[in-house]
Each structure stands twice: as structure tokens, then as C-alpha cells.
Image (cartoon, rainbow, N blue to C red):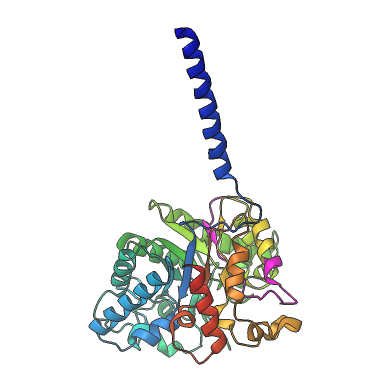
Amino acid sequence: MKKKKNMITAGLLVVVLGLTTFFSTLCKVELPNEERTSPEEKRAVFFSYMEIEKYFQGVGEEEAKTKIREIVTFLKEKNFNMILLQVRSFSDAIYPSKIYPMSKTLTGIENSEYPFDFLAYFIEEAHKREIEVHAWINPYRVRNNTDVQSLSLKNPAYGWLGTNKVKVIENQGIYYNPASIEVQDLIIQGIEELIDNYSIDGIHFDDYFYPDDTIDQEEYQEYQMTMTKQEFHLAQVNQLIRRVYETVKKKEGLVFGISPEGNIDNNYQRNYADVKTWLKEDGYIDYIMPQIYYGFENEVKPFERTLEEWNDLIQNDVVLLPALALYKSGLLDQYAKSGSAEWQNHTDIIKREIEASRKIPKYQGFSLFRFGYLYDDTENQNLKEEREKIFELFK
């Protein structure tokens, strides 16, 4: 009798365990094409030197700190969790640096005094609200004009004027030579300074790479018999990217990401950003944030097709965070050909792009360009409606 009772109990246990496993498995089933959202989704926004100049230049300490708190509180309330803060846009710094002068975007005049550590306070307030801060750097750009008189004596580019390490490019600006080892060392030293002194969450580069084809002519002479100019340019950028990655990885938890141009071919023909290598081989980047600044109706580069092209390039563990063109809302997109009026005819493009991106295997978040379009008062009705639909998406 006891044996029979034990057999019945064991049988019931098997049935219960089987049902538990069945329902547990059922709960884990992921429906096809269903949006994948999770607390890990990165909801980022670019905060450029233009915002820094607009909100903080010439502003006193208390007013500036109040504005920082207001900005990060706004992002928290709208459920954003990552900000790409442009800490170095013109061979300068928005923080006290032993390498670069204080940025004129904060002070109006390069290398002037600023009343407090802007970056430290920004990070502190952002982290209180669980918002990541990634230090956005333009590694090669010194100026977006040719005014060498605006360079302070502390700017590293000033001491290199007249050498092949820096070039003044007519109608374009002043740039460091990507093929110069001294330039690469300078960039690495600047990143080490940031990592050592600030609790940033990542380092970020955008799409400003090679400024022209002749800036490295002297260095190329040694290699012209073994590689094309394009191959040489790509190799110089790759060398820097590898070095940055190695530097970043010295600090646990820190990540390195890049926002290349959305048109993959242009990265090779104009910018010499070897995105295919970065998305195939390890040791370059942690995330890719291509500037897919296109609408769904763009005749040349439709959004969904371009997004899939980027996703298909990824053969390693790099995650995809597409950058989206909030700034186009309500405007004519002159390069979209037959789709040029799309941003004027619709007010839910960004919302739909986020929803479409969530269905992509390598997706882990997105970023909007840029903060001012998300935050500032505007008479652009399309933009008003566009951002309200974005906010609704995260409620």
C-alpha cells in the first residue's frame, strides 16, 4: 500500500513538473516580428557644442548648475538614459585639462577661466538620475574655419602650425594629420586624462575622420609602393581606433562607440572609416551608431533598407544603436529625391523608425540628433508633434 502510494505521488510530481516546464517555456516564447524592449534599451541624445554654447556661454556658476540639473531632469522624466556630451569639439575641453585649453564654447574665448568643473558636475547630476554620460570627442578637428588667430597658445595645434601635423584647409577648417604618430599620441593622452579624472561611461567619436586626401602626403611616401592612398588612409584611422579601444578597456565597464556616416560607401570614399573591419574583427569598438538620417520614403537610402544593411555588416559582438534625424522634422529633405517632402507630410517618422529598429537582431537602442530639437521651444508644428509621439512611446 505504501509503495503504491509513493508511485502515485511520484507520478503527480512528474505531471506537475511537466506542466511547470511547459508554462515556463510558453512564457519565454518570442513572437515573430514583435518589438523587443527591455530596461537595457539605450535611449540616447547628442548634446553638441552648439547646445553648450547656447545654454552656458557667459552664464554664471549657479545659473549654469541650475540649467544642468534642468536638462538631466528633463531627460530622466522623458525616459532617456544616455547622453553623448561633446567634451572636445575643437582641440579643446569643457573641463580643466593639462593638455587642451578651456573651450570657447563655454567661455567665448579659448583658454579663459570657467568658474567650476562643468563636466564633473554634469556627470554627477546625470548619474543621480541613472543617465549614462559618454564623452563625445572630435579627434582631428581643430577648427571648422581657417582662423588660426583664434587658437590660444595652450592649444596643441598652435605649436604645430606650419608642420605636417596640422593643416589649414581652405573653405573647410583646421585639422590634425591622422597619419602623424604624434597626433595619435596626443589624442590617446587626452582620452587617458578623461578616463583617469572622470567617471564617464564611454568614449564616443562621430563621423569626422580624414579631412582631405593630401594632409598625410609626407607619411604616405614611404608606403605608396605597397598600398593605395585609400588603403593607407583606412589603415591610419584603424590604428587610432585600435589604440583608443585598448585605452578605454583599461577601465572596467567603459565602452567605446562611433557614429559613422549612414551611407556605408561614403565612409570608404570620403571619410576613410573602415566600418566593415570594425564590425567583423574584435578590438575596435563596442557599439556602432550609424547616422541613418533618412526617412522611409528616401529614394536613395530608404531607412529600413539602410538599417538592415548596417545590421547585416555586424559579424562580431558590436551592438547597433542607430542615430536618427530629429532635426529634419518639418523640413524639406533635398537629397531624398521623390521622398523629399516626407518630413513635411508626416509627424511620426522618428517614432516609426524606433519601432522598426527594435525588430532588428543587433539593435540595442538609438540616439537622436540633437538635444535642442528635443528640448527647445519651437514654432515647427511637425517637430512638436514628432517629439510628443516619441515621448508617448516610452510611457
Q: Residue furthest front?
A: 1
Q: Is residue 136 magenta?
A: no
Q: In the displayed structure, does residue 202 sit left or right of residue 21?
A: left
- Segment tinted magenta in the rendering: 282-306
How far across and how far down the image is residue 394, in percent? 48, 67
Q: Residue furthest bottom?
A: 379
Q: Main secondary structure of the magenta part?
A: loop
Q: In the displayed structure, does residue 180 sit left or right of residue 198?
A: right
How far across and how far down the image is residue 125, in percent? 30, 69
Q: Quadrant of residue 208?
A: bottom right
How far across and how far down the image is residue 272, in percent? 63, 68
Q: Is residue 287 magenta?
A: yes
Q: Give above or below for 140 relative to 174.
A: above
How far across and how far down the image is residue 81, in percent? 42, 65
Q: In the displayed structure, does residue 10 sit left or right of residue 65?
A: right
Q: Nearer the viewer, residue 277 or 342?
A: 342
Q: Is residue 56 visible?
A: yes
Residue that appears at 40% across and 75% down: 156
Residue that appears at 61% across and 70% down: 353
Q: In the displayed structure, does residue 226 sit left or right of residue 85?
A: right
Residue that appears at 36% across and 85% down: 55
Q: Give above or below for 239 relative to 329.
A: above
Q: Nearer the viewer, residue 134 or 174?
A: 134
Q: Is residue 165 visible?
A: no
Q: Quadrant of residue 229?
A: bottom right
Q: Nearer the viewer, residue 199 or 341?
A: 341
How many numbered badges does the structure rendering display? 0
